[in-house]
Image: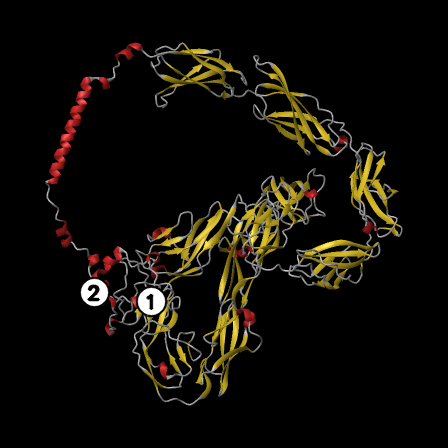
Amino acid sequence: MCGQYSNGKKRLSYAVKPPTITHQSPKDYIIDPRENIIIHCEAKGKPPPSFSWTRNGTHFDIDEDPNVTLKPHSGTLVVDISRAKAEHYECVYQCTARNKHGTAVSNNIVVQQSRSPLWSKEKVKALVVQEGVSLVLPCRPPAGLPPPIIFWMDNNFRRLPQSSRVSQSLNGDLYFSNVLREDSRNDYICYARFPYTQTIQQKQPITVRVLNRKSDYRKPTFLIPSGPTSSKMVLRGQVLEMECIAEGLLTPDVSWTKVSGDLPAKRTSFLHYQKTLRIVDASESDAGDYRCTARNRLGSVHHTIHVTVKAAPYWIGGAPRNLVLAPGESGVLTCRASGTPKPSVSWAMNGIPIENSPKDLSRKVEDDTIIFTDVQTGSSAVYQCNVSNDYGYLLSNAFVNVLSETPRVLTPANKVYQVIKNHQALLDCASFGSPIPKITWFKDSRSSTLDGDPYILHDNGTLEIHVAQARNSGKYTCVARNILGINENHIYLEVKDPTRILKQPEYKVVQMGRSVVFECKVKHDPSLIPTMTWLKDDGELPDDERLIVDSDSLTITDVTENDAGVYTCVMNTTLDHDSASAELTVVEATTPAVGYERPDPPTDLELTDQKKRGVQLTWIPGDEHNSPIQKFLIQYQDSLHHRGHWHNLTEVPGTRTTAHLKLSPHVHYTFRVLALNAVDFSRPSFPSRGFKTEPADENPTGVQGFGTEHDNLVISWKPLSGLQSNGPGLHYRVMWRQKVVDSDWTTVTVANNSKFVVSGTPTFVPYELKVQAVNDYGAGPEPAVAHGYSGEDLPVAAPDHVQVMLINSTLAEVHWDPVPSKLIRGHLKGYKVYYWRKHSLHKHNPDLVENQILTFSGNHTHRKLPGLHPFSVYSLNVRVYNGKGEGPPSPDLQFNTPEGVPGAPTSLVVTNPNLDSLTLEWSPPHDRNGRITGYTLKYQPVNNSNELGPVEELALPANETSVTLPNLKYSTRYKFYLNAKTVRGAGVAISQEAVTVIDEAVASRQVDIATQGWFIGLMCAIALLILILLIICFIQRNKGGKYPVKEKEDAHTDPEFQPMKDEDCTFGEYSDNEDHKPLKGSRTPSNGTVKRDDSDDSLVDYGEGGDGQFNEDGSFIGQYSGKSASRETAEGHESSEAPSPINTMNSLNSFV
């Protein structure tokens, strides 16, 4: 048992969960020494795990190292190398994540920094060779981590040409099968690119001089490998590369074969002009002997390489999977892996070898398997499986989580699925629980589980209907249950009619300048929203006002030559689509009319692929007569039943000349074909040879039973067609019996009809039904048994034990016991709750009756009554109803709703406004919804900009209906809010605004200051004074001296505008005493680190550094250095002395 999900696509968080490692750094982790070291370790669990690390097998105390920090909420280590050297942290690390339910561990992460050592100092002598001999130019780059990429170039940074004569070997050496005079040069330079540090280094140039004395022709010999045989080992999954480089004059050709079989075509490639055989993703089947052959006109030579394939451990069927078990269950953890040699398997629990872990009687270890039996709560843990051999190891964590969980259905409630008729329907019921819940499905009335045709129940709980029909629409219920509980969910299926094009666009021929119309009439399900789209030549329609798209047509006016093409109408809905195409041919208006005629009839009709109910018909089309054939019409004649009468069978597009025909039983067929073009149908073809289908034994379909009265049973069926009767004298044998043990079948014979009524039946009794077809030749096969019920009658009983549970003042829940099925006397449709408000409990409210009915379909035993009035007396009764009608009511049950918050007061009026007081009068709420316990009055002043002032609040007794507010401000607008209160709280407030009276004495003393003469004179004096001050300032400014701008500019010339020295654009000479110095042009920050994010691209693939230069010893430092201010400051004037090889970079870019 591997988990408790019934649907793997769903995820659910466990209440408790042991840790799981979700992300970690690779086992062999190469770091850039210029960047901070980040060693990843992420894990999840419940509760969230804590993290710790080991370094070189011992505990790594992170708090003791100031350069190391742990990312928040993570186990990821971050090492700041700005204050330390990266080599101090080249160790083996392992991360541990633990919580109280277990411990998970990461792989051993071996951290190594990338290295790009300098080329060793050597004196390279010129090589003098005779024309035609072989030659090897060694590269021998310094060993880097990872190994460098080797390439050969000249002094102008152009790649040296290679061919079948001259090529580079896998170790970087340059091989000449024979040298020519044009091979003489003094700039054979080997370059090594170190990808992690983004640096390129060069070897000292090699000089080759070829003497003009050609050697004799000779047959091939191998330069590498040596001897007649050699061996090579490769690991499974890696790349197998073998090379054979031969010398000879003339240049030999190299070919490869596998002695013990064929080369794997899809995984094999040849490099370096066939000298290298490369097989990717090596497997055990690639082991064996490989032969390379070098051949020229003088002879050949062979070499055999024996390949062995070893394998580091690899999983068989995947790593161990987490196990979720319920108490008392059993399960298995499997750690199955393979390798060459065979790996060993060891187990640990929570990071401790399992032999040293606490004993557990429910656990048994058998090699690569742990068997758990009758597990108990508290035995959750994380198990580690380690599989290793000489070539590697696999480490995997898998937890065993012991849980007790009641079922939960994860699929959203009341989800609606929509499918097209005759398509597949898949209804999901994803669930979670421990033990694993069992899923059952019901439809509508839940009378029986859905586990037979047409339903297919999948292991993950999904219900499949292979071919959905309209009758499959409805409400489905999926139920998930285990020993701890049950949970259910409702899902709805809607089966829609398919979208079909009823009238397809037809082929058109139109003259230029005229109009043409393509029709496209469509039928679709009325509940789906259709979208019509027109295409031209499978692309969008041109944006042209001459193309007019209507709901069911496309019109093209003033047709041009460019309008010719294939037009397609596509009708899309959210569930399906349909399309049809027609071609438009545009002809010149002035050309003589082309002669169009109807096509010639098809010929050579042939019947093939004959089956019991079908045959394939092929034919050869006749002449189209300048109008393409649009379709073929296939007709048939039944020489057995209707000789001489031709009937339409099917149509196929004009591009096809074959049709697969579905046929009826017991017919003697003869076929003919007619072709249709824009003119008319052709004459019929000559008839095909005859084809007879065998008689079929059929019975009517659609057998069902129902009652129209309480004492009858109507048995109906779909009658057979004339072809299905297979003979004269068709009639039906109708059989029925009550669905009880040992009852006998009653049989009657019915003429060619579609129903039979059985009278005098008991009310609503299940029956088994059969209808068998019979003709003069005998009876059909034994019919299938259908099921039905006799007629319904009104229920005779009411629900018992009706109770009301009050949820709040406006909502109650009614409970009742279901009526026994025998007393319902029909198909249970549901229950109806009749309820009415008798009167309010408040003495001031009048009595009233509000009858209401709530109908609940389905077999429910409780439902909610919403929208009740608070503080009221209600009565109700419950009735069951079936297809015939309602049963008797239950005894009336009376209940009182509790108090609620009141409505707003009926009115609020302001009276008697004075200078500092107002009187408010109000009426109680119309809907009191309880006993009024008081009123709350709030009021606040409002200024002229409608800003509200501080709020004053006043509590008033319940028997008050007016209040006078003293000490108000005169001539001030106030806003008032009044609400009533019951024990349930305050109700909605009513608001009103009013203004206190203006004090006339104060108003008379207020004078408009702007109209006083002294104020006007003062303002004029101030304006004149400001004008005089502005004039004085302007005069003083014009008398001022000029600023010495020119002198300051001359004194502080911007260094950015200094002329460039000519020597800045040249290379420096090589100097032997500076072989191991970095280039003067290279930039390195003072803290010793270079961030990649600050770098500029340069040697695209090789160096990728814009300012990189070559040392005299050939080292090229492409550091991707950005031109930041801090770096230029560190360099001083020295950086301007280094060569700036702009042309050099352009040359390199053509190769990199």
Label 2 vs label 1: CA separation?
21 Å
Q: Rate crowding at label 2 as few (under 14), some (14 to 19) or many (20 or more) other CA atoms within 10 Å.
A: few
- Quadrant into which the C terminus falls: bottom left
Residue 1101 coordinates in the image, percent (x, y): 38, 65
Question: Which SS class for mark 2?
Answer: loop
- Of mark 2 and mark 1, the one earlier in the sequence is 2
The residue labelled by disc 1 is 1146
Q: State the image quarter where residue 828 is shown.
A: top right
Residue 148 visible somewhere in the drawing: yes
Of residues 268 and 1097, the one drawn nearer to the viewer in this rendering: 1097
Residue positioned 49% across, 63% down in the render: 393
Tag 1: amino acid: Asn
Q: Rate crowding at label 1 as few (under 14), some (14 to 19) or many (20 or more) other CA atoms within 10 Å.
A: few
Residue 96 coordinates in the image, percent (x, y): 45, 53
The residue labelled by disc 2 is 1061
Of residues 1039 and 862, the one drawn nearer to the viewer in this rendering: 1039
Of residues 714 and 891, the one drawn nearer to the viewer in this rendering: 714
Residue 696 coordinates in the image, percent (x, y): 81, 54
Dot label at residue 865:
none
Of residues 672 and 254, the one drawn nearer to the viewer in this rendering: 672
Tell me: 187 left or right of 311. left
Q: State the image quarter where residue 842 is shown.
A: top right
Residue 102 visible somewhere in the drawing: no
From this view, report whether residue 183 is shown above or below residue 995. Answer: below
Q: State the image quarter where residue 167 is shown.
A: bottom left
Residue positioned 25% across, 73% down in the render: 1070
Tag 2: amino acid: Lys
